Amino acid sequence: MSGFGDFSGGGHSMSSEDSAQLEMQAFIEAENQKAAIQAAISKLTETCWDKCVGKPGARLSGGEQECISNCAERFIDTSQFVMQRMAKLSVDGNH
């Protein structure tokens, strides 16, 4: 079974199969991150639209624009806070 043991410094080089597997893992991680970002944007749009826009028209009113801007800022602030908190709990939980 191949794995990260190949990096033990014993002069072994990574096989092309191992390299391809690592590339695939990196690709999957990048795609998962893209999907998470798209989901967050979708949720932000839905949440702020529902909160701020009463009757859709040809244009957003000044109040609607301000509400959406404030809503988006609070949504982003909250998301960042939650992610930082989860990261801190993850780090603290590993000790």
Image (cartoon, rainbow, N blue to C red):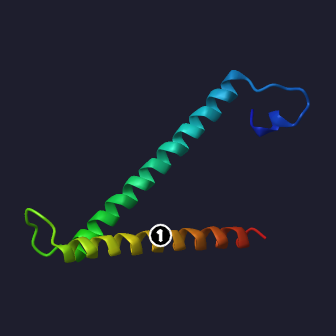
Rendered location of residue 85, percent (x, y): 59, 74
- In-front residue for pair 30/60: 60
Residue occupying image coordinates x 59% and y 39%: 25
Figure check: 82 above or below 29: below
Residue occupying image coordinates x 38% and y 53%: 38
**Residue indicated by mark 1:** 79
Among all residues in the image, which is located at the extreme right? 10
Rendered location of residue 63, percent (x, y): 20, 77
Rendered location of residue 33, percent (x, y): 49, 50
Figure check: 47 above or below 31: below
Can residue 1 be seen in this snapshot? no
Among all residues in the image, which is located at the extreme top? 16
Instruction: Describe residue 28's horizontal placement relative to residue 11 as left or right.
Output: left
Can residue 75 be seen in this snapshot? yes
Q: Is mark 1 on a helix, strand or loop?
A: helix
Residue occupying image coordinates x 55% and y 45%: 29
- In-front residue for pair 71/1: 71
Residue occupying image coordinates x 89% and y 34%: 9
* Quarter-of-image position of residue 51: bottom left
Q: In which quarter of the image is the C terminus?
A: bottom right
Q: In which quarter of the image is the N terminus?
A: top right
Q: Which amino acid does label 1 sit on?
A: Ser
- In-front residue for pair 28/76: 76
Tell me how many marks there are: 1
